[in-house]
Image (cartoon, grey):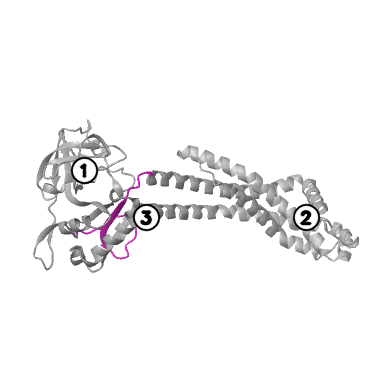
Protein backbone atom coordinates (compact mmCIF):
# COMPACT_ATOMS: atom_id res chain seq x y z
CA UNK A 1 0.00 0.00 0.00
CA UNK A 2 1.32 3.42 -0.94
CA UNK A 3 2.14 5.93 1.78
CA UNK A 4 -0.31 8.50 0.39
CA UNK A 5 -3.12 5.95 0.48
CA UNK A 6 -2.29 5.00 4.08
CA UNK A 7 -2.30 8.69 4.98
CA UNK A 8 -5.73 9.17 3.36
CA UNK A 9 -7.21 6.17 5.17
CA UNK A 10 -5.75 7.29 8.51
CA UNK A 11 -7.19 10.78 8.09
CA UNK A 12 -10.58 9.30 7.19
CA UNK A 13 -10.53 7.18 10.35
CA UNK A 14 -9.73 10.24 12.47
CA UNK A 15 -12.49 12.32 10.84
CA UNK A 16 -15.08 9.56 11.24
CA UNK A 17 -14.73 9.82 15.05
CA UNK A 18 -14.30 13.57 15.48
CA UNK A 19 -15.22 13.87 19.16
CA UNK A 20 -13.09 10.90 20.16
CA UNK A 21 -10.13 12.19 18.17
CA UNK A 22 -10.48 15.70 19.65
CA UNK A 23 -10.55 14.37 23.22
CA UNK A 24 -7.53 12.15 22.54
CA UNK A 25 -5.61 15.03 20.97
CA UNK A 26 -6.54 17.25 23.92
CA UNK A 27 -4.39 15.13 26.24
CA UNK A 28 -1.34 15.77 24.05
CA UNK A 29 -2.25 19.47 23.72
CA UNK A 30 -2.28 19.86 27.51
CA UNK A 31 0.98 17.95 27.91
CA UNK A 32 2.87 19.88 25.23
CA UNK A 33 1.40 23.21 26.40
CA UNK A 34 2.53 22.54 29.97
CA UNK A 35 6.07 21.71 28.84
CA UNK A 36 6.30 24.78 26.56
CA UNK A 37 4.90 27.03 29.31
CA UNK A 38 7.39 25.96 31.95
CA UNK A 39 10.38 25.86 29.60
CA UNK A 40 9.53 29.36 28.33
CA UNK A 41 9.12 30.69 31.87
CA UNK A 42 12.41 29.07 32.91
CA UNK A 43 14.21 30.58 29.91
CA UNK A 44 12.70 34.01 30.62
CA UNK A 45 13.60 33.85 34.31
CA UNK A 46 17.16 32.81 33.54
CA UNK A 47 17.58 35.61 30.99
CA UNK A 48 16.18 38.16 33.45
CA UNK A 49 18.31 37.09 36.42
CA UNK A 50 21.51 36.63 34.43
CA UNK A 51 20.90 39.93 32.67
CA UNK A 52 20.74 41.75 35.99
CA UNK A 53 23.70 39.92 37.50
CA UNK A 54 25.83 39.98 34.34
CA UNK A 55 25.27 43.71 33.88
CA UNK A 56 27.09 44.37 37.16
CA UNK A 57 29.96 41.99 36.44
CA UNK A 58 33.38 43.32 37.46
CA UNK A 59 36.97 42.00 37.11
CA UNK A 60 36.99 41.01 40.77
CA UNK A 61 38.21 37.94 42.64
CA UNK A 62 36.52 37.42 46.02
CA UNK A 63 38.71 35.61 48.56
CA UNK A 64 37.87 34.13 51.96
CA UNK A 65 38.64 31.13 54.20
CA UNK A 66 35.80 28.83 55.27
CA UNK A 67 35.26 25.23 56.46
CA UNK A 68 36.34 22.65 53.90
CA UNK A 69 33.45 21.21 51.92
CA UNK A 70 31.01 23.90 53.03
CA UNK A 71 28.24 24.46 50.50
CA UNK A 72 25.65 27.20 50.35
CA UNK A 73 25.54 30.62 51.96
CA UNK A 74 27.32 32.35 49.07
CA UNK A 75 30.77 33.96 48.92
CA UNK A 76 32.17 34.88 52.31
CA UNK A 77 29.90 32.49 54.23
CA UNK A 78 31.67 31.22 57.36
CA UNK A 79 34.71 33.40 56.65
CA UNK A 80 37.35 33.71 59.38
CA UNK A 81 39.58 36.81 59.86
CA UNK A 82 42.95 35.43 58.70
CA UNK A 83 44.21 37.87 56.03
CA UNK A 84 46.77 40.23 57.53
CA UNK A 85 47.72 43.73 56.42
CA UNK A 86 50.97 42.21 55.09
CA UNK A 87 48.94 39.77 52.96
CA UNK A 88 46.94 42.66 51.53
CA UNK A 89 50.16 44.48 50.54
CA UNK A 90 51.71 41.33 49.05
CA UNK A 91 48.62 40.52 46.96
CA UNK A 92 48.47 44.13 45.77
CA UNK A 93 51.96 43.65 44.29
CA UNK A 94 51.09 40.47 42.36
CA UNK A 95 51.09 40.60 38.56
CA UNK A 96 47.74 41.60 37.06
CA UNK A 97 46.33 43.01 40.31
CA UNK A 98 45.10 46.59 40.20
CA UNK A 99 43.96 46.91 43.83
CA UNK A 100 42.96 44.94 46.91
CA UNK A 101 40.02 45.89 49.12
CA UNK A 102 40.00 44.32 52.58
CA UNK A 103 36.72 44.01 54.42
CA UNK A 104 35.92 43.28 58.05
CA UNK A 105 32.89 43.26 60.30
CA UNK A 106 32.40 45.42 63.38
CA UNK A 107 29.76 43.89 65.69
CA UNK A 108 27.14 46.43 66.78
CA UNK A 109 23.90 46.46 68.72
CA UNK A 110 22.12 49.42 67.17
CA UNK A 111 22.39 52.63 65.14
CA UNK A 112 20.81 55.89 66.30
CA UNK A 113 19.99 59.06 64.35
CA UNK A 114 17.64 61.97 64.96
CA UNK A 115 16.50 60.63 68.28
CA UNK A 116 15.57 57.23 66.77
CA UNK A 117 17.31 53.91 67.37
CA UNK A 118 17.16 50.82 65.14
CA UNK A 119 18.78 47.43 65.65
CA UNK A 120 21.84 46.73 63.50
CA UNK A 121 23.95 43.68 64.31
CA UNK A 122 27.02 44.75 62.36
CA UNK A 123 28.63 47.44 60.21
CA UNK A 124 31.13 46.80 57.42
CA UNK A 125 34.68 48.09 57.84
CA UNK A 126 36.56 48.62 54.59
CA UNK A 127 38.80 51.06 52.76
CA UNK A 128 37.78 54.10 50.64
CA UNK A 129 38.83 52.19 47.50
CA UNK A 130 35.77 49.97 48.01
CA UNK A 131 33.79 52.81 46.44
CA UNK A 132 36.08 53.46 43.48
CA UNK A 133 33.36 52.27 41.09
CA UNK A 134 31.06 55.05 42.33
CA UNK A 135 27.37 54.39 42.86
CA UNK A 136 26.73 57.39 45.13
CA UNK A 137 23.33 59.02 45.08
CA UNK A 138 24.98 61.91 46.90
CA UNK A 139 28.12 62.59 48.92
CA UNK A 140 31.47 60.82 48.75
CA UNK A 141 33.51 57.97 50.20
CA UNK A 142 34.76 58.27 53.76
CA UNK A 143 38.39 59.10 54.57
CA UNK A 144 40.64 56.59 56.34
CA UNK A 145 41.24 57.56 59.95
CA UNK A 146 38.07 59.68 60.24
CA UNK A 147 34.79 59.14 62.08
CA UNK A 148 32.73 59.06 58.89
CA UNK A 149 30.20 56.55 57.53
CA UNK A 150 28.53 55.69 54.23
CA UNK A 151 25.00 54.25 54.14
CA UNK A 152 23.09 52.51 51.42
CA UNK A 153 19.55 53.51 50.51
CA UNK A 154 17.97 50.84 52.71
CA UNK A 155 19.94 51.86 55.81
CA UNK A 156 19.14 55.57 55.35
CA UNK A 157 15.45 54.68 55.00
CA UNK A 158 15.34 52.97 58.40
CA UNK A 159 14.82 56.41 59.93
CA UNK A 160 12.01 58.90 59.47
CA UNK A 161 12.84 61.24 57.92
CA UNK A 162 15.61 59.44 56.04
CA UNK A 163 19.19 60.14 57.02
CA UNK A 164 20.95 62.63 54.72
CA UNK A 165 24.55 63.58 54.01
CA UNK A 166 25.83 65.77 56.83
CA UNK A 167 23.70 64.11 59.52
CA UNK A 168 25.33 62.43 62.49
CA UNK A 169 24.66 58.83 63.52
CA UNK A 170 25.67 56.98 66.67
CA UNK A 171 26.99 53.44 66.41
CA UNK A 172 26.38 51.40 69.54
CA UNK A 173 29.10 48.77 69.49
CA UNK A 174 28.67 45.26 70.83
CA UNK A 175 31.36 46.07 73.42
CA UNK A 176 29.01 48.63 74.99
CA UNK A 177 30.79 51.72 73.69
CA UNK A 178 29.13 54.30 71.44
CA UNK A 179 30.80 56.14 68.57
CA UNK A 180 29.37 59.19 66.82
CA UNK A 181 30.13 59.60 63.12
CA UNK A 182 29.13 61.87 60.26
CA UNK A 183 27.25 60.53 57.22
CA UNK A 184 29.35 61.59 54.22
CA UNK A 185 27.84 59.43 51.47
CA UNK A 186 24.60 57.74 50.43
CA UNK A 187 24.70 54.92 47.90
CA UNK A 188 21.97 54.50 45.33
CA UNK A 189 19.68 51.47 45.36
CA UNK A 190 21.75 49.39 42.91
CA UNK A 191 25.07 49.90 44.70
CA UNK A 192 26.71 49.12 47.99
CA UNK A 193 26.36 45.39 47.98
CA UNK A 194 28.85 43.45 45.97
CA UNK A 195 29.18 39.70 46.07
CA UNK A 196 29.63 39.46 49.82
CA UNK A 197 26.47 41.34 50.73
CA UNK A 198 24.25 39.43 48.33
CA UNK A 199 23.33 40.08 44.72
CA UNK A 200 20.09 41.81 45.62
CA UNK A 201 21.65 44.55 47.81
CA UNK A 202 18.30 44.66 49.64
CA UNK A 203 19.54 44.75 53.23
CA UNK A 204 20.51 47.91 55.14
CA UNK A 205 24.29 48.35 55.04
CA UNK A 206 26.50 50.74 56.99
CA UNK A 207 30.13 51.19 55.89
CA UNK A 208 32.91 52.56 58.11
CA UNK A 209 36.69 52.99 57.59
CA UNK A 210 38.91 50.29 59.06
CA UNK A 211 40.78 53.00 60.94
CA UNK A 212 39.58 53.77 63.62
CA UNK A 213 36.60 51.37 63.75
CA UNK A 214 38.06 47.93 62.98
CA UNK A 215 40.25 46.52 65.75
CA UNK A 216 40.42 42.77 65.11
CA UNK A 217 44.09 41.80 65.40
CA UNK A 218 46.08 38.58 65.70
CA UNK A 219 49.72 37.76 66.36
CA UNK A 220 51.29 36.15 63.31
CA UNK A 221 53.08 32.88 64.27
CA UNK A 222 56.85 33.14 63.88
CA UNK A 223 56.97 36.94 63.71
CA UNK A 224 55.55 37.92 67.09
CA UNK A 225 53.90 40.89 65.37
CA UNK A 226 50.20 41.75 65.85
CA UNK A 227 48.38 42.89 62.73
CA UNK A 228 44.84 43.67 61.70
CA UNK A 229 43.24 40.59 60.15
CA UNK A 230 40.32 40.58 57.70
CA UNK A 231 37.81 37.82 56.86
CA UNK A 232 37.36 38.73 53.17
CA UNK A 233 39.32 40.36 50.38
CA UNK A 234 38.22 41.71 47.02
CA UNK A 235 41.10 41.54 44.54
CA UNK A 236 40.49 43.78 41.52
CA UNK A 237 42.24 42.61 38.36
CA UNK A 238 43.57 45.04 35.77
CA UNK A 239 40.98 43.85 33.24
CA UNK A 240 38.66 40.91 32.55
CA UNK A 241 41.34 39.08 30.57
CA UNK A 242 43.60 39.07 33.63
CA UNK A 243 40.97 37.58 35.99
CA UNK A 244 41.87 33.85 35.54
CA UNK A 245 45.60 34.49 35.99
CA UNK A 246 44.95 36.79 38.97
CA UNK A 247 42.74 34.19 40.62
CA UNK A 248 45.41 31.49 40.20
CA UNK A 249 48.25 33.69 41.50
CA UNK A 250 46.24 34.81 44.54
CA UNK A 251 45.40 31.22 45.45
CA UNK A 252 49.04 30.17 45.02
CA UNK A 253 50.27 32.99 47.25
CA UNK A 254 47.71 32.30 49.98
CA UNK A 255 48.44 28.58 50.12
CA UNK A 256 52.23 28.82 50.04
CA UNK A 257 53.55 32.17 51.28
CA UNK A 258 50.89 34.08 53.18
CA UNK A 259 50.44 34.84 56.89
CA UNK A 260 46.87 33.60 56.38
CA UNK A 261 48.21 30.08 55.72
CA UNK A 262 49.66 30.11 59.26
CA UNK A 263 46.51 31.53 60.85
CA UNK A 264 43.82 29.53 59.07
CA UNK A 265 42.31 26.62 61.12
CA UNK A 266 43.23 23.12 60.03
CA UNK A 267 39.79 22.21 58.68
CA UNK A 268 39.47 25.44 56.68
CA UNK A 269 40.42 26.12 53.08
CA UNK A 270 40.87 29.22 50.94
CA UNK A 271 38.16 30.00 48.42
CA UNK A 272 38.39 32.36 45.47
CA UNK A 273 35.46 33.16 43.20
CA UNK A 274 34.91 35.60 40.37
CA UNK A 275 31.71 37.26 39.24
CA UNK A 276 31.61 34.77 36.36
CA UNK A 277 31.77 31.88 38.83
CA UNK A 278 28.76 33.33 40.62
CA UNK A 279 26.89 33.78 37.33
CA UNK A 280 27.64 30.15 36.40
CA UNK A 281 26.34 28.94 39.77
CA UNK A 282 23.11 30.88 39.35
CA UNK A 283 22.74 29.59 35.79
CA UNK A 284 23.17 25.99 36.98
CA UNK A 285 20.63 26.51 39.76
CA UNK A 286 18.06 27.99 37.36
CA UNK A 287 18.63 25.18 34.85
CA UNK A 288 18.07 22.58 37.57
CA UNK A 289 14.86 24.31 38.66
CA UNK A 290 13.59 24.56 35.08
CA UNK A 291 14.37 20.90 34.37
CA UNK A 292 12.62 19.81 37.57
CA UNK A 293 9.43 21.75 36.81
CA UNK A 294 9.51 20.65 33.17
CA UNK A 295 9.85 17.04 34.33
CA UNK A 296 6.63 17.43 36.29
CA UNK A 297 4.92 18.86 33.20
CA UNK A 298 6.06 15.85 31.15
CA UNK A 299 3.80 13.68 33.32
CA UNK A 300 0.77 15.24 31.60
CA UNK A 301 2.35 14.37 28.24
CA UNK A 302 2.68 10.75 29.38
CA UNK A 303 -1.01 10.77 30.31
CA UNK A 304 -1.79 12.07 26.82
CA UNK A 305 0.19 9.23 25.25
CA UNK A 306 -1.77 6.69 27.30
CA UNK A 307 -4.94 8.24 25.86
CA UNK A 308 -3.64 7.71 22.32
CA UNK A 309 -2.72 4.09 23.10
CA UNK A 310 -6.15 3.46 24.57
CA UNK A 311 -8.04 4.97 21.65
CA UNK A 312 -5.90 3.08 19.13
CA UNK A 313 -6.68 -0.22 20.84
CA UNK A 314 -10.38 0.64 20.60
CA UNK A 315 -9.91 1.56 16.93
CA UNK A 316 -8.23 -1.77 16.18
CA UNK A 317 -11.09 -3.64 17.84
CA UNK A 318 -13.74 -1.66 15.94
CA UNK A 319 -11.99 -2.19 12.61
CA UNK A 320 -11.19 -5.89 12.96
CA UNK A 321 -13.40 -6.83 10.03
CA UNK A 322 -11.92 -4.05 7.90
CA UNK A 323 -8.43 -5.40 8.70
CA UNK A 324 -9.56 -8.86 7.59
CA UNK A 325 -10.88 -7.52 4.27
CA UNK A 326 -7.67 -5.58 3.67
CA UNK A 327 -5.58 -8.70 4.23
CA UNK A 328 -7.92 -10.78 2.09
CA UNK A 329 -7.35 -8.48 -0.90
CA UNK A 330 -3.56 -8.60 -0.49
CA UNK A 331 -2.55 -6.10 2.21
CA UNK A 332 0.66 -7.10 4.00
CA UNK A 333 1.34 -6.90 7.75
CA UNK A 334 3.55 -3.86 7.17
CA UNK A 335 0.67 -2.10 5.37
CA UNK A 336 -1.65 -2.55 8.34
CA UNK A 337 1.14 -1.56 10.74
CA UNK A 338 1.82 1.59 8.69
CA UNK A 339 -1.87 2.50 8.59
CA UNK A 340 -2.38 2.48 12.36
CA UNK A 341 1.03 4.03 13.15
CA UNK A 342 0.20 6.91 10.82
CA UNK A 343 -3.11 7.45 12.57
CA UNK A 344 -1.43 7.54 15.99
CA UNK A 345 1.37 9.81 14.71
CA UNK A 346 -1.18 12.24 13.23
CA UNK A 347 -2.98 12.47 16.57
CA UNK A 348 0.33 13.24 18.27
CA UNK A 349 1.26 15.78 15.57
CA UNK A 350 -2.04 17.65 15.85
CA UNK A 351 -1.72 17.71 19.64
CA UNK A 352 1.82 19.14 19.58
CA UNK A 353 1.06 21.71 16.85
CA UNK A 354 -1.95 22.98 18.80
CA UNK A 355 -0.23 22.67 22.17
CA UNK A 356 2.74 24.86 21.22
CA UNK A 357 0.82 28.17 20.78
CA UNK A 358 -1.31 27.33 23.81
CA UNK A 359 1.88 26.90 25.84
CA UNK A 360 3.28 30.21 24.56
CA UNK A 361 0.04 31.99 25.53
CA UNK A 362 0.18 30.40 28.98
CA UNK A 363 3.81 31.49 29.42
CA UNK A 364 2.95 35.01 28.24
CA UNK A 365 0.10 35.30 30.75
CA UNK A 366 2.29 34.01 33.59
CA UNK A 367 5.19 36.29 32.59
CA UNK A 368 2.90 39.32 32.55
CA UNK A 369 1.56 38.39 35.97
CA UNK A 370 4.98 38.11 37.61
CA UNK A 371 6.56 40.95 35.62
CA UNK A 372 9.00 39.01 33.43
CA UNK A 373 10.08 39.83 29.89
CA UNK A 374 9.14 36.86 27.71
CA UNK A 375 12.03 35.05 26.01
CA UNK A 376 10.90 32.35 23.58
CA UNK A 377 12.98 29.15 23.35
CA UNK A 378 12.36 28.58 19.62
CA UNK A 379 14.29 25.32 19.53
CA UNK A 380 11.73 23.86 21.94
CA UNK A 381 8.93 24.46 19.41
CA UNK A 382 10.57 22.03 16.98
CA UNK A 383 11.30 19.65 19.86
CA UNK A 384 7.62 19.81 20.92
CA UNK A 385 6.42 18.82 17.44
CA UNK A 386 8.97 15.99 17.23
CA UNK A 387 8.03 14.77 20.71
CA UNK A 388 4.33 14.87 19.83
CA UNK A 389 4.91 12.67 16.77
CA UNK A 390 7.18 10.34 18.76
CA UNK A 391 4.63 10.06 21.56
CA UNK A 392 1.95 9.17 18.99
CA UNK A 393 4.15 6.52 17.36
CA UNK A 394 5.20 4.94 20.66
CA UNK A 395 1.64 4.98 21.97
CA UNK A 396 0.31 3.45 18.76
CA UNK A 397 3.07 0.87 18.32
CA UNK A 398 1.45 -1.97 20.26
CA UNK A 399 -2.08 -1.43 18.87
CA UNK A 400 -0.64 -1.25 15.32
CA UNK A 401 1.45 -4.39 15.86
CA UNK A 402 -1.64 -6.11 17.30
CA UNK A 403 -3.64 -5.13 14.21
CA UNK A 404 -0.89 -6.32 11.84
CA UNK A 405 -0.84 -9.76 13.51
CA UNK A 406 -4.58 -10.23 13.18
CA UNK A 407 -5.52 -13.47 11.39
CA UNK A 408 -7.61 -12.54 8.30
CA UNK A 409 -9.96 -15.54 8.67
CA UNK A 410 -10.74 -14.73 12.30
CA UNK A 411 -11.07 -11.06 11.39
CA UNK A 412 -13.67 -11.81 8.67
CA UNK A 413 -15.69 -13.88 11.13
CA UNK A 414 -15.59 -11.06 13.74
CA UNK A 415 -18.95 -9.44 14.52
**SS under mark 1:** strand
User: Which residue is tagged 3?
Assistant: 277
How far apart are the two marked residues, 3 and 2, measured between alpha carbons? Answer: 56 Å
How far apart are the two marked residues, 1 and 3, measured between alpha carbons? Answer: 27 Å
**SS under mark 3:** helix
Which region shows up in magenta?
55-81
**Which tag is nearer the camera, tag 1 or tag 3?**
3
Residue 129 x/y as whole percent? 21, 46
The circle on residue 315 is 2
The circle on residue 265 is none
> Residue reaching furthest top?
161
| Residue 240 visible from this viewpoint | yes
Residue 238 as seen in the image, left or right of residue 369: left
323 and 219: which one is in front?
219
Circles 3, 2 touching at the beta carbon (< 8 Å): no
Residue 146 x/y as whole percent? 11, 42
379 and 405: which one is in front?
379
Amino acid sequence: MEFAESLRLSWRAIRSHKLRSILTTLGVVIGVAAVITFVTLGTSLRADVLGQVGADRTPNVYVWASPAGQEGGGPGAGAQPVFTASDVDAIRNLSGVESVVARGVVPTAAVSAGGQTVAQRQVIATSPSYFDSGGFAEGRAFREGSREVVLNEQAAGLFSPSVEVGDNVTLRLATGNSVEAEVVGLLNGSSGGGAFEGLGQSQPLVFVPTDPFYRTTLEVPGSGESQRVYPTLTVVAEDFAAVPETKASVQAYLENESDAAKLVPGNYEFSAETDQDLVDQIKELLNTLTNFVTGIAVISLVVGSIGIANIMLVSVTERTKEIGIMKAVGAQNRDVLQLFLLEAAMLGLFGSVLGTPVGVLGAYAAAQYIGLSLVLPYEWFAIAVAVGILVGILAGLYPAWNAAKTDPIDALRYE
